[in-house]
Image (cartoon, coloured by chain):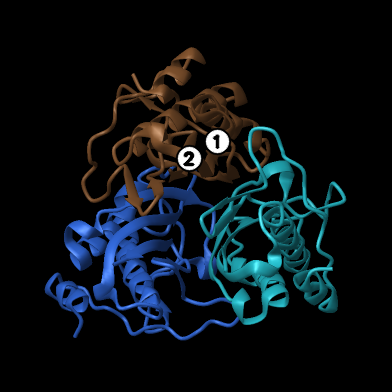
Chain colours: A cyan, B brown, C blue
Amino acid sequence: MSEVAARLAAAGYELPPAPGALGSYVPAVLTDRLVFTAGQLPLRAGQLLASGIVGAEIDPEQARACAEQAALNALAAASTVCDLDDVERVVKLTGYVASTAGFTAQPSVVDGASAVMLAAFGEAGRHARAAVGVIALPLGAPVEIEIVLALR
Amino acid sequence: MSEVAARLAAAGYELPPAPGALGSYVPAVLTDRLVFTAGQLPLRAGQLLASGIVGAEIDPEQARACAEQAALNALAAASTVCDLDDVERVVKLTGYVASTAGFTAQPSVVDGASAVMLAAFGEAGRHARAAVGVIALPLGAPVEIEIVLALR
Amino acid sequence: MSEVAARLAAAGYELPPAPGALGSYVPAVLTDRLVFTAGQLPLRAGQLLASGIVGAEIDPEQARACAEQAALNALAAASTVCDLDDVERVVKLTGYVASTAGFTAQPSVVDGASAVMLAAFGEAGRHARAAVGVIALPLGAPVEIEIVLALR
């Protein structure tokens, strides 16, 4: 088990298996020392944890759990092109939250994803972050997470 | 004709002329070996192919054609700062789709943009990708596409 | 006073003090020569300049002023990890504008942020840019701005 997987497990998170290729795009690309992942949905064993709009069908706690799962999937995506134990820094995390016009607590939702990065990498997991509310996401997912990592 | 333009032509796509500067921002920036393009709309000869919201006035097929055109424009934007034949890899593609709250097939729309990258670069065109649904885009465009490229 | 702060002051802008860390994420990350900032809101002295949706409660002029302030905050965020006088180029600026479905002038809003980059860095401030309309932003902010900078 990698150090990252062990740290995640100690925090109660399970690193998913690395996804296969998806057709016209791939889970992640490594260029020089940077890894860019595809946007990840809160899928677990092929099923969305929840679907709908935060502020309507989905409450903030469910959405935060979705952000955690999507972040775990982002790490699994990154692991297709690097060893997660070689991550020097989580550079950037972007969280898209499917929101009603009146829901403005996107940061508390995306905190779920940030917590996964801290659990996985400690201080090196502290990242720049953007959280925005979008009208809809693929498959009706409440959250989509993408990350940029720098390797040693 | 560049190799990339020839491959695009063979796939039935026409690489647009490189756009001029746009005022306070530019079509693309090259830093070290990475090219970041501005977000590109489905303009052809100065006109939007379509305008409106996908799931309302715009159907998925029209939206996919818009994604193709915006992707071609992204390559034209990149060509202002590099020779497209020097592209080592398409690193990241982000597709913003102007959507109703009920439209969740953003990936099938953005597949149009991904297909252009595969046509242009073959295996090197396989990229990490995010597809999200947004409430509105500049000029009423149904789709906006931006890319990050790595050069040899 | 740094050269950048002086140029901003000459253009009538005030560079805010560098923000503190925010908990699970940070204002900016430096990796090699690239600085990625967190998404920044139009906060001044801890208060939003305005809150609401552009095209409804917020008019384009107010939104443009919000984009300026958020861009100044993005520079302050970057200054936590670099000397702004070492910026070689503003690489990318992304502007998220909280919009009604009918508001499609996001570029004129985000021009406020672009103007700040030109004031701060002159020619080196000309960047690739994406402007998109989103349904909601943290705290009800009308605009969120993030930047990528390259250092000398």
Q: Examine the rendering and report whether any part of residue B33 can be seen.
A: yes
Q: Tell me which corner region of the image, top left, top right, bottom left or bottom right, holds residue B55.
A: top right
Which subunit holds the residue at mark 1?
Answer: B
- Give left or right: position of C2 versus A52: left
Q: Which of A114 and A65 is in front in this view?
A: A114
Q: Point out which mark residue C30 bears.
A: none
What is the number of callouts on the image? 2
Image quarter in which the C terminus of chain C is found: bottom left
Above-or-below relation of B73 to A13: above
- SS class of the residue under badge 1? helix
Residue A123 position within the rendered picture, expressed as x and y whole percent measured from the top left = 61, 81
Q: Which of B122 and A127 is in front in this view?
A: B122
Residue B10 position within the rendered picture, expressed as x and y whole percent measured from the top left = 48, 13
Image point 41% across, 43% down: which residue? B39
Q: Nearer the viewer, residue A77 or A82?
A: A82
Mark 1 residue crowding within 10 angstroms, few (<14) / some (14–19) / many (20+): some
Residue farthest to the left? Answer: C10
- Give left or right: position of B87 versus B18: right
Which subunit holds the residue at mark 2?
Answer: B
Callout 2, which amino acid? Glu
